[in-house]
Image (cartoon, rainbow, N blue to C red):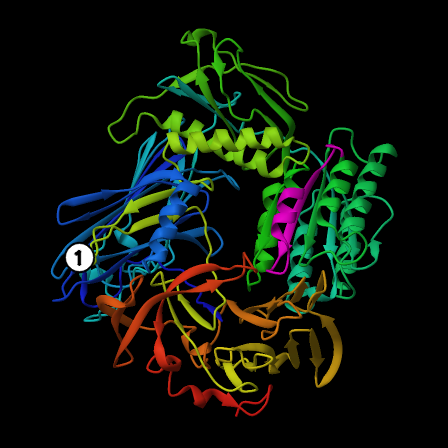
Amino acid sequence: MKLVKSSFSTDINTKKLNCMKYVTVDCTVTSRFAHTVMTSKALNKANISQEIFFEVELPKTAYITNFSMEIENQVYVGEVKEKEKAKKQYDAAVSRGQTAGLVKASGRKMEKFSVSVNIAAQSNVTFTLTYEELLQRKLGHYEIQTRVKPKQLVEEFKIVTNIYEPQGISYVDAHATFLSNELLPLVEKTVTEKKARIYFSPTLEQQRSCAGCEGTLIDGDFIIKYDVNRAKTLGDIQIVNGYFVHFFAPPDLPRVPKNVVFVIDRSGSMSGTKIYQTKEAMLAILKDLHEEDYFGIILFDSSIDPWKDSLIKANKENVDEAMAFIKRLHDRGATNINDAVLRAVDLLRQGRSDHIVPEISIDMIILLTDGMPNVGESNLPRIQENVHAAIGGNMSLFCLGFGNDVDYRFLDVMGKQNKGLARRIFEASDATLQLQGFYEEVSSPLLSEVDLRYPDNAVDFITTNHFDQLFNGSEIVVAGRLTDNDLDNFLVEVFAQGVRKGDSRNVDIDEEEYIFGDFTERLWAYLTIQQLLEKRSVNATGSEDEKGNATAKALDMSLLYNFVTPLTSMVVTKPETENGTDSPLVADKLTEVDGDPHFLIELPDRDDALCFNINDKPGTIFNLVKDSTPGILVNGQIIGDKKIPPDGKINTYFWRFGIIHRTLGVRLEVTTRDISIFQDGHRVNTIALQSRCCTHNGLAVTAGQMQYNMHEYITFLILLHKVWEKHPYHRDYLGFYTLDSHLMTPNVHGLLGQFYHGIEYEVTDLRPGEVPEKPDATMYVKGQELNVTRGWQRDFRRDEKNGENIPCWFIHTNGTGLIDGDATDYIVSGLFKTV
């Protein structure tokens, strides 16, 4: 089984035996390019060596460029390597039972970098992580988000941000989710014409959550927003060390009218909160339409139902009628994405051919769906081909994927192939605001078909210089290398719908001490790598050679500029361990880890895992999860081999699960064959577990996988493991995973549920075990001292045939000492029983 505990933490080990000496976040922004250095120093105050953890959350758009550890005046520096080469070192470490550093997804905008190292008694360790990103302008401002959760008082805590913008700074705002009335005055902000400095450094006493408390107020996001002055020209060009960057976002441009078709999924899986939030968002969006806009609405499930047969002007009378139509929206049926989008294309084409819409206007489709296509055309690549051919480059497609059941990759590629993009809408109380926020970003087009041109004899290796549109509040960025230093002849031409060509001369940057002078070159490299990676994944018509060349170039540049990208990993060799071997840490770009052995408890806060087996006779039913407040129950029944194998050991597996959500009146029975769905005691549906594609009220089934989102409380995944039907002993079995559980109440329990909110433990005295590559250690947990073994369990999510090894501490004897009580305490009398 697998438990993933949701975590949004940035912490240097929270154990009381460790003392946090300092935590500093130093961010330097030069012309939107942010260079952030996070440094932490911790002291092991214990009289024994112990593991100290370093965890930092960074924006998903950032690239790690350096990581180092300083221990006893010895510095261990990371090296960026090709991912495959780094993986060999990683696998070697795992085979010795050692841990590795990873970057994992964490929330909507962040990902977590996590490493640990064993530190001697009374010794210090200093961690330093550096990352870089190009700040993107959205809704009229740039945003710098720093997540800080030290989880304990810090002797010296400091956030310092220096911003330098040659165009001039129009405003700066700084706030934090944790700022109390007492902490607010500590945010120091100094702003001059071109520079801003934000400084926040509460004393140890000011950090306390209350007088005499050990808890800290520092827990959340520190956010800086700012914008720059904009001259009424063709943008701003800055040149440093032979590279240029061009920022283009001219002010005071009139918005271009838009023709928009909203394509809204109303299939059965949209029932309840999702359909309500969609209606609320659509009512607000319709109110925001401009009168010169034209719009249409298409509702779809297994059938396609346009509101009107043609586009209609967004005057008050028509908007009111559309709002009344949306209020009647309700869920039903299956999901036919292909025909719905093609019908939207036809509406926009008809608007053009019948001269209904203004000649100078922009056509766009906004698709909202929460599931997989399962009616009509359901082959995802074929849907992408159909849509791409129908649109023909004449309109933009924006795809909104609502919740976890949707294939976001499918939507992302389809959007980018058609002058648009995709955005995931998270199932949460603010989903309405997420929908409205996305619409606000794309609702006011200013220019279309934007071309920025530079003298051929003066520049080369420029990044993308053609853009489908420029939206109000956003910005276009182009960078390149100069081949001609005669800047008097550096003429820029901009061509766009409704705009004549013009020229803009460069603005030189004055060198400042805190400005890293090679920022234009690194910004150029950052943009180039991003665009190459996008080209290799999105270009539907490109040849394999073109995609291969894009990959090779992106890899070369990632290595040259020391960026951790999807093609590279950062390797840090840890200090020698007690057995005299080096243990490499490997940091990847956004890697998520899962597992499917008997029981695997992943603990992201510790970057570690615990595992144990529960052995009992076939037919036994165990309670896995029980939370009486939302009325959630999960039980699992084990099955044995067909007959006793020659070694006399009968293997047992889970083959059947019972899942209850009493509040909703829903009950599921999942077996290796099918899923039976009961509503208020009545069977309403039966779905074969190996169905190609089905969705139903938060339940998604795809070829042996079942994922169930229980209305934000918890998300389960069940995998079918097929065994050769003529195998003399083994049977098909099921793997159970918890993908998200952070909203479960503190009362949640069960063999898995008791770990949903984490567990405190210490591991010391690493020593040789019975098997050389599986050392033993002593674990202190729940007031007990246990002998544990460093081993691994297999993860079958990515490789259902062979699995992949996940290192963990194995607790012997049915998890005794780790689980509450005895394993027999969790036996229940029926699949849907609590006792």
Q: Nearer the viewer, residue 679 or 364?
A: 679
Q: Is residue 697 left or right of residue 835?
A: right
Residue 816 visible in the current orientation: yes
Q: Magenta segment range?
A: 392-414
Residue 175 visible in the current orientation: no
- Residue 99's place in the image compared with 168, above or below, is below
Q: Is residue 255 left or right of residue 585?
A: right
Residue 404: quarter of image: bottom right
Residue 319: image x %, image y %?
76, 51
Residue 66: image x %, image y %?
31, 40
Residue 564: image x %, image y %?
40, 40
Disc count in the image?
A: 1
Q: Residues within 10 Å of mark 1 (few under 14, many from 20)?
A: some
Residue 556: image x %, image y %?
44, 30
Residue 336: quarter of image: bottom right
For the point 72% across and 43% down, the residue is 384
Amino acid carrying label 1: it is Glu
In the picture of the structure, the residue carrying the numbered disc 1 is 155
- Residue 431's place in the image compared with 720, above or below, is above
Element class at badge 1: loop
| Residue 408 belongs to the span the image colors magenta | yes
| Residue 406 belongs to the span the image colors magenta | yes
Q: Nearer the viewer, residue 483 or 109?
A: 483
Q: Is residue 582 left or right of residue 252?
A: left
For the point 68% across and 23% down, the residue is 498
Q: Residue furthest front?
A: 646
